[in-house]
Amino acid sequence: MEERTVYTGEYVGKKYKVGTLFTYGVSVPAKDRRGGCALLVNHDGLRDCEVEAMAKLHHSKKAPACIVVGIGSGRLPASVDGSYDRGMRADNYDMRDREYADFVVNELLPFLINEYHLHVSKSPDLHAVSGGSSGGISAWQIAWYHPEYFHRVYMSSPSMLAMGRGDEWPNLIRKCETKPIKIWTEYSEKEVDDYFGESAPVCEALFRSLKVAGYEVQGAYFAGEGHCSKYGNAEHLCEVYAWLWANLDVPVTVKRNTARVDAVVPFGSKWEKTTENFPLKIAMNVKSPVGSYVTRGSQIVLLHKGGAEIVEKGLKVPTALAVSSDGGMLYYADKNSGVIAAYQILKDGMLGARKIHGMLHEKGDFDIPGALDICVDREDRVYAATEMGIQCIRSFGLIDVILDNPDGLQVKRLAFAPDGSSVLYAETARGVYKRTLAVGALPEGQYSQPCHTSYFD
């Protein structure tokens, strides 16, 4: 077996997870490769079984030489006399947000690489992350939020449960654009079943969602066994990592998206920063067959030949209006509301009762629950600019696609090219971006029959 050097220590979060104390271990091959070793980051501290598995696989030429980093779940040291340390495992691992992922990639790993002069490959294809139970969902989230850094994930009985809204992942994976990640996930028959959910069916749902979304994924199920039953088995880990590291000469890429994502955006289309001006768009003023609708304070007002009429009152913080493709509905976004509302436009221009058109998905740690802007394509799909991404609401009223925000930035304004081409423009704090979609918007004053008007079409 290869000789290895082990370093251990503690680190206190400075920019991310501020004040949380983490223990770590780093296992480095004695013959360090200056061209760059592979990297495996695992949870629950440095685990001998993973170090052993990686050493065996490298010896048999089934895996690259690998630096293994183990991070223990953090704790918050007692701050006053009589108080106690607080375990931060749930805060670090289970919350569906990106702060722990940012801590690992942007703070702890750069510190370790610099502190111990580690020669780590810069290729994300040579970076893997692993974990069991809560560490499993954390491993997924680290790769999901940082696919530019990690392309390989091992999850043992990942706890995608309602501890920190992790139970939403199987559905979100089906709706979001696929990322370049290769995954091994596994679970057992006798999984956890408690107040925060039942692990076995969620693990199965996760595997099915990954397959639907086009990920390269391998799954394993262990009848008669329990939670994370093979997580500490070095022989089993050799099988896992032999598969994860196989075909290293072939980059991990996105092979396809779901059919629903493809219906919105052509495969391969990406956001591009542009020097073009954002399309002319009069905020909160949209035309319909019966006149123009604008917002004034907490009201929606109809402007027509006869003058102006108040048609809705009691708005919270209105951000956008849009008219449906057939001119029969008025869509409404509010910064402080987690839904896109809809009003039927009546013959006299008055509005019918407010309906919930789409219930928006939210980031785990959101600041703004609502959409800052909306626009509509010729098929009557609403595009809502939210913190989580551009959420696409079918005419039937369900969100089936969430497009990535450009550079991960909150979109402030959203509009289609006015010439009817299938180009969507988005403005963020960094400027204007554009992306080619599958469908564009109708020129102003033209209308068409809505599409996607049932659950499954």
Image (cartoon, grey):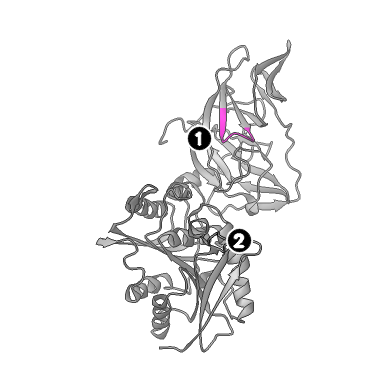
* Residue 318 in which image quadrant: top right
Which mark, residue 79? 2
Residue 102 position (above or below residue 368) = below
Q: Between marks 1 and 2, how big is the CA–CA gap?
A: 51 Å
* Residue 413 in which image quadrant: top right
* Residue located farthest toward the front when viewing the structure as drawn: 82
Residue at 60% x, 75% y: name it: 112
Residue at image mark 1: 394
Q: Tell me the kind of residue under disc 1.
A: Arg
CB atoms of marks 1 and 2 within 8 Å:
no
**Residue 180 percent coordinates (x, y):** 51, 61
Q: Mark 1 Cα within 10 Å, few/some/many (few <14, many 20+)? A: many
Per the image, is 38 magenta?
no
Using the image as rendered, state which of residue 301 and residue 98 is in the foreground: 98
Residue at 48% x, 82% y: name it: 65
* Quadrant assignment for the C terminus: top left
Label 1 sits on a secondary structure element that is loop
Question: Magenta residues?
Answer: 334-341
Q: Tell me the kind of residue under disc 2.
A: Ser
Residue at 49% x, 32% y: name it: 397
Left or right relative to 9: residue 241 = left
Per the image, is 338 magenta?
yes
Label 2 sits on a secondary structure element that is loop
**Residue 310 percent coordinates (x, y):** 68, 16
Left or right relative to 387: residue 453 = left
Residue 64 position (above or below residue 404) = below
